């Protein structure tokens, strides 16, 4: 399911399974479908989180019928969790699906994550990996990643930094952050023992990848094979901040897993005519959509957290992309997914679904027979992009945010 161990260039097309193309993730023999199943909300305590039965039905359809092999999860999932739906429940749902037929393990490439920050230590990497193995009911994890860095980075506040603050490096929370060498050594040991097939980082940057790879080389252990970051029509930051270059086969030869390809649902067009409830000035409509949410942006908790996808520039760009999609005879969501698929730096795109209908549209967008977007379509997209190269973090209303420190680049933070 996850590959044959042979080495080669990352992103290389290696096989077709069902209707899915599989590509090499990193320089080794881990293979992933171009579409990966995002599972953040599987079994969660939320208004439309898929329950175990629906999760199993989605796995049946994607894996057994369409040839998708990648499922991406984390020890911290589901989000949000609850007493009766605790962290780790998502891994157990995947494990219970595997338990129905042990041959299914050969059809899956399982990626999971250790919780980031201060939790990242050599002993915790081993302990948490073994916990994930138990919940998943498997003897190995294909891709094991840090959910976010241990050190201070501009990503430490999800990209809102207006500058890199050297003094933050000395904050008690970050001052004794686990070193690149200690992380690489711990991950390398798990690879050598066969508990994981490869490792990597999420929500990190080009420096994090280069330093991790250098540490692994110096120690003579397996280098990272995967980076996972926010990437969409509204956020091409990885193309311009050095990460796509660093990941290239001629440099660190590291795969790239794109998440939030639909920008929290904004790129589906579902909020185009009636704004997200958290933004809506109409009390009547707001109440109706809070009572019956169309998606996460109609939920106060998610809506406030994910404000970055609804900056004025993001909403305007999403509308222009929707118009391009209409001209091409496809949905806005399909355009966003097929654009991500077209990017040479992207190995796989992680998509969450809350219904089989959504999952079917996702599988169709990544179907091996689907023609690539044409040059004219890609240029139309680029002309929108060049008017604002990073709408996700723009803010034309920053003056209204209040005191300094609030709302750096588009999101109001505590």
Image (cartoon, helix red, strand yellow):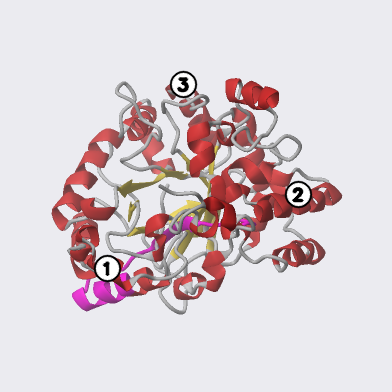
Q: Secondary structure at mark 2?
A: helix
Asked if 160 appears above or below 87 in the picture, the reply is below
Q: Where in the figure is residue 44, as x and y percent of width and height? A: 41, 28
Residue 53 is marked as 3
Q: Distance from label 2 to label 3 (Cα)?
A: 35 Å
State which region is magenta.
Answer: 211-234
At horizontal 43% and vertical 78% (from top left) the residue drawn is 251
Residue 182, image x and y in percent? Answer: 18, 65
Outermost residue toward the front in this view? 403
The answer to which of 280 and 96 lies nearer the viewer is: 280
Q: Going by the image, does 393 lie left or right of 190?
A: right
Instruction: Name above or below for residue 384 compared with residue 361.
Output: below
- Res. 275 image quadrant: top right
Residue occupying image coordinates x 54% and y 31%: 299
Q: Position of residue 90 (x, y in %)?
A: 37, 33
The residue carrying mark 2 is 319
Mark 2 or mark 3: name the one nearer the start of the chain.
3
Q: CA distance from mark 2 to mark 1?
A: 40 Å
Q: Earlier in the sequence, mark 2 or mark 1?
A: 1
Q: Which residue is mark 1?
A: 169
Q: Secondary structure at mark 3?
A: helix
398 w.r.t. 376: above or below: above
Q: Is residue 64 magenta?
A: no
Question: Which residue is the extreme one toward the right?
Answer: 327
Which of the 4 quarters of the picture holds residue 206?
Answer: bottom left
């Amino acid at each position: 399911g996850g590959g044959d161990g042979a080495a080669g260039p990352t992103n290389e097309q290696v096989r077709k399974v069902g209707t899915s193309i599989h590509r090499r993730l990193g320089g080794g023999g881990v293979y992933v479908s171009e579409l990966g199943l995002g599972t953040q909300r599987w079994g969660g305590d939320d208004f439309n989180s898929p329950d175990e039965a629906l999760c199993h039905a989605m796995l049946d359809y994607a894996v057994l019928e369409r040839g998708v092999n990648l499922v991406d999860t984390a020890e911290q999932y589901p989000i949000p969790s609850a007493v009766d739906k605790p962290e780790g429940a998502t891994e157990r749902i995947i494990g219970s699906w595997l338990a129905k037929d042990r041959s299914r393990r050969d059809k899956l490439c399982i990626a999971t994550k250790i919780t980031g920050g201060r939790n990242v230590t050599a002993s915790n990497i081993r302990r948490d990996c073994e916990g994930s193995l138990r919940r998943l009911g498997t003897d190995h994890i294909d891709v094991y990643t840090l959910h976010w860095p241990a050190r201070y980075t501009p990503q430490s506040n999800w990209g809102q930094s207006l500058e890199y603050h050297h003094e933050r490096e000395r904050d008690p929370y970050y001052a004794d952050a686990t070193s690149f060498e200690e992380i690489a050594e711990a991950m390398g040991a798990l690879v050598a023992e066969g508990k994981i097939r490869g490792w990597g980082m999420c929500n990190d940057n080009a420096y994090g990848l280069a330093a991790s790879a250098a540490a692994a080389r110096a120690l003579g252990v397996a280098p990272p094979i995967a980076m996972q970051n926010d990437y969409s029509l509204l956020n091409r930051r990885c193309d311009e901040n050095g990460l796509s270059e660093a990941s290239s086969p001629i440099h660190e030869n590291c795969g790239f897993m794109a998440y939030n390809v639909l920008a929290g649902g904004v790129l589906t067009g579902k909020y185009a005519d009636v704004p997200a409830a958290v933004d809506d000035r109409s009390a009547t409509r707001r109440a109706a959509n809070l009572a019956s949410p169309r998606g996460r942006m109609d939920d106060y908790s998610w809506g406030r957290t994910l404000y970055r996808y609804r900056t004025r520039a993001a909403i305007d760009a999403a509308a222009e992309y929707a118009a391009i999609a209409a001209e091409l005879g496809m949905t806005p969501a399909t355009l966003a997914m097929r654009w991500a698929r077209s990017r040479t730096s992207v190995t796989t795109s992680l998509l969450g679904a809350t219904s089989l209908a959504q999952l079917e549209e996702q599988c169709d967008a990544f179907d091996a027979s689907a023609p690539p977007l044409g040059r004219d379509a890609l240029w139309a997209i680029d002309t929108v992009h060049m008017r604002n190269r990073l709408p996700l973090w723009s803010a034309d209303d920053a003056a209204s945010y209040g005191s300094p420190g609030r709302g750096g680049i588009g999101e109001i933070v505590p």
